[in-house]
């Protein structure tokens, strides 16, 4: 096939179009599920017609797992979602895709002109066993591994950070830490509690590979470590994701994945503004379980490219099911977004938090990696319109003992939420919606999951 | 239907796309730095970092040298962050995102061998001179 086509404005679009066509053909030929969903007779015209294909939801995969597979043989590796968002979902990768990934990224590395005196970065990867066997990808960096699940592991991580190595062609000190947000927060909390200044190491980059961390906390971590914080958006179901190069910046998508943003009510593509992220993985990076138009359930704000042909980027807003949104004539309007509510409450030390990685450091320090106590619910009318939003917030104290303080933080929370949503402010003002804040003691409301 | 694509051509196209993406990421970083410089001043930005990290109380202690140091750190980080993309890609098992993620166990699966954007990192190195020049003007 010809990969030198010039019909696209960008190489990114050309790359995605070519592989999307291969993906559709591959799925039609090899997956009974896709054979039904994407009949061979139906014309497919590449990237421009992707939006016309049916959406794929998690339940579709769960309910048709064996038919979904493009390869009936045993997988070379098994990964899985954590199951905290619903039923546990096993994800298979076959040997062919692992081999391609190895081959492709090796060729990519080899074909680049790398200056002879360039040192390979030395990175510390904080390991995780939450998602099964990771996919190995050839890399220029030299990677050390450690855990942070107990004090022994954390101490080993510290030893690696302190140590000076003498691997030929590799940096002498660890310059980057890569791990899930919790692991990096846990390590930071451990260090701070031990009186170790993280900025005394040689770390210049913290790379989050998962989890949700507010901009405020990312900036805090950047200052503590004197490092840049890079965040990655990804999910087990899709090979490829997006990168936020610096806190507060939008997320830019990998070339290996095709993003779309659709309205959660009409399911039509949105040109800008709030919508749900839909992702398509690409053959040959995904071969056993490619997902075509996968509904992620993540709300994003789509920011179109400023120049002709420029890819759009997104700001992540939180899970759709943890947010309260409404359909309006001009598109989806958020009333309360999960991300915004979290950031609002996170800024208030009054709000109780349950520590995580207990025993690694003091409970107070480990709250840094913990969960806040709150819940959000809405009441709707028959027409589906929300007429009440009830937020229950667990405080570190009995609210009746400190009524003035409780009233004060209630005002702060309302103000923040109104600032974040004109629609919410307007609806409350006109009396068509009530925003109820209910303050309780910590143990009266469980920790909130953003999943 | 031939379910293949010539690897060399695919890599070549990918590298052109990677350059586009690299330019996009760099723009966001530059915007962020510019925002710091206008909102608080580069010195103040650096001062905060130093203060919080070392418990030095006074902003007055912030020296031009510190600001410069922060600038260099940022630039270096920018170059290096490309490596990170790689690392993260390696953690494909990661269920990250705000999505799954906001959570807890979310997405940490990191591969021992990492990533994609190594390649990009070299491109980043090429651009770092420009970036350094930009930072020196702040």
Image (spheres, rainbow, N blue to C red):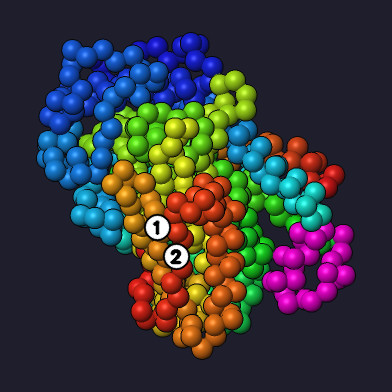
Inter-mark Cα distance, 1 to 2 = 7 Å
User: What is the chain letter for disc 2?
Assistant: A
**Residue sitting farthest toward the front:** A431
Give me the residue at 29% from left, 15% from top.
A44
Give me the residue at 87% from left, 59% from top.
B64
What's drawn in magenta, residue-wise?
Answer: B42-64
Query: Is there CB contact under 8 Å for labels 1 and 2?
Result: yes
Viewer-closest of A355 and B113: A355
The answer to whether any part of residue A259 appears in the image is no
Q: Secondary structure at mark 2?
A: strand
Number of marks present in the image shown: 2
Q: Quadrant of residue A75?
A: top left
Residue tagged 1: A388
Q: Quadrant of the C terminus of chain A?
A: bottom left
Q: Position of residue B131 (x, y in %)?
A: 74, 41
Question: Label 1 crowding class (10 Å Cα cut-off): few <14, some 14-19, many 20+?
Answer: some
User: What is the chain letter for disc 1?
Assistant: A
Q: Quadrant of the N terminus of chain A?
A: top left
In the image, residue A38 lies in the stretch drawn in magenta: no
Q: Position of residue A253 (x, y in %)?
A: 48, 37
- Magenta stretch, main secondary structure, is helix
Q: Say whether disc 1 or disc 2 marks the residue closer to the N-terminus.
A: 1
Q: Secondary structure at mark 1?
A: strand
Q: Position of residue A423 (x, y in %)?
A: 51, 46
Q: Which mark is residue A436?
A: 2
Question: Label 2 crowding class (10 Å Cα cut-off): few <14, some 14-19, many 20+?
Answer: some
Viewer-closest of A373 and A145: A373
């Amino acid at each position: 096939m010809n990969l030198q086509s010039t019909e696209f404005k960008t190489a990114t679009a050309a790359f995605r179009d070519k592989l999307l066509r291969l993906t559709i053909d591959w799925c039609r030929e090899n997956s009974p599920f896709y054979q039904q969903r994407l009949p061979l007779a139906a014309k497919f015209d590449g990237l421009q017609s992707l939006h016309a294909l049916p959406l794929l939801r998690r339940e579709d995969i769960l309910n048709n797992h064996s038919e979904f597979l493009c390869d009936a043989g045993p997988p070379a590796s098994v990964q899985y979602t954590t199951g905290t968002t619903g039923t546990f979902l096993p994800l298979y990768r076959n040997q062919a895709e692992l081999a391609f990934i190895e081959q492709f990224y090796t060729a990519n590395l080899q074909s680049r002109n790398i200056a002879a005196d360039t040192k390979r970065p030395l990175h510390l990867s904080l390991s995780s066993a939450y998602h099964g066997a990771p996919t190995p990808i050839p890399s220029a960096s030299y990677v050390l591994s450690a855990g942070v699940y107990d004090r022994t592991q954390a101490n080993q991580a510290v030893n690696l950070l302190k140590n000076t190595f003498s691997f030929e062609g590799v940096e002498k000190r660890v310059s980057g830490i890569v791990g899930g947000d919790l692991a990096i927060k846990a390590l930071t909390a451990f260090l701070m509690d031990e009186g170790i200044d993280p900025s005394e190491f040689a770390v210049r980059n913290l790379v989050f590979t998962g989890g949700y961390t507010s901009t405020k906390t990312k900036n805090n971590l950047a200052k503590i470590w004197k490092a840049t914080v890079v965040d990655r958006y990804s999910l087990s179901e899709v090979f490829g994701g997006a990168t936020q190069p610096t806190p507060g910046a939008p997320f830019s998508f990998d070339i290996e994945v095709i993003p779309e943003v659709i309205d959660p009510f009409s399911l039509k593509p949105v040109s800008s503004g709030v919508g749900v992220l839909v992702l398509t993985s690409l053959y040959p990076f995904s071969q056993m379980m490619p997902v075509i138009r996968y509904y992620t359930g993540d709300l994003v704000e789509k920011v179109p490219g400023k120049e002709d042909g420029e890819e759009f980027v997104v700001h992540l807003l939180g899970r759709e099911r943890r947010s309260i949104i409404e359909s309006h004539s001009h598109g989806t309007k958020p009333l309360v977004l999960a991300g915004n509510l979290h950031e609002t409450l996170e800024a208030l030390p009054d709000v109780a938090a349950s520590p995580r990685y207990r025993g690694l450091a003091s409970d107070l320090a480990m709250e840094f990696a913990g969960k806040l106590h709150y819940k959000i619910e809405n009441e709707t009318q028959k027409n589906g319109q929300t007429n009440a939003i009830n937020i229950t917030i667990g405080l570190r104290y009995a609210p009746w003992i400190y009524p003035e303080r409780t009233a004060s933080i209630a005002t702060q929370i309302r103000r923040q939420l109104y600032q974040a949503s004109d629609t919410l402010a307007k609806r409350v003002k006109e009396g068509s919606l009530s925003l109820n804040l209910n303050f309780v003691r910590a143990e009266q409301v469980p920790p909130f999951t953003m999943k | 239907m031939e379910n293949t694509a010539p690897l060399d051509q695919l890599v070549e196209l990918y590298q052109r796309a990677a350059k586009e993406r690299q330019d996009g990421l760099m723009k966001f970083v530059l915007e962020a730095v510019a925002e710091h410089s206008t909102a608080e001043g580069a010195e103040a930005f650096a001062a905060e970092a130093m203060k919080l990290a070392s418990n030095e109380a006074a902003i007055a202690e912030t020296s031009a040298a510190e600001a410069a140091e922060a600038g260099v750190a940022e630039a270096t980080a920018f170059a290096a962050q490309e490596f990170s993309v790689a690392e993260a890609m390696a953690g494909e098992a990661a269920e990250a995102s705000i999505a799954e993620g906001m959570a807890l166990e979310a997405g940490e699966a990191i591969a021992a061998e990492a990533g994609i954007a190594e390649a990009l990192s070299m491109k980043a190195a090429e651009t770092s001179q420009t970036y350094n020049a930009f930072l020196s003007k702040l």
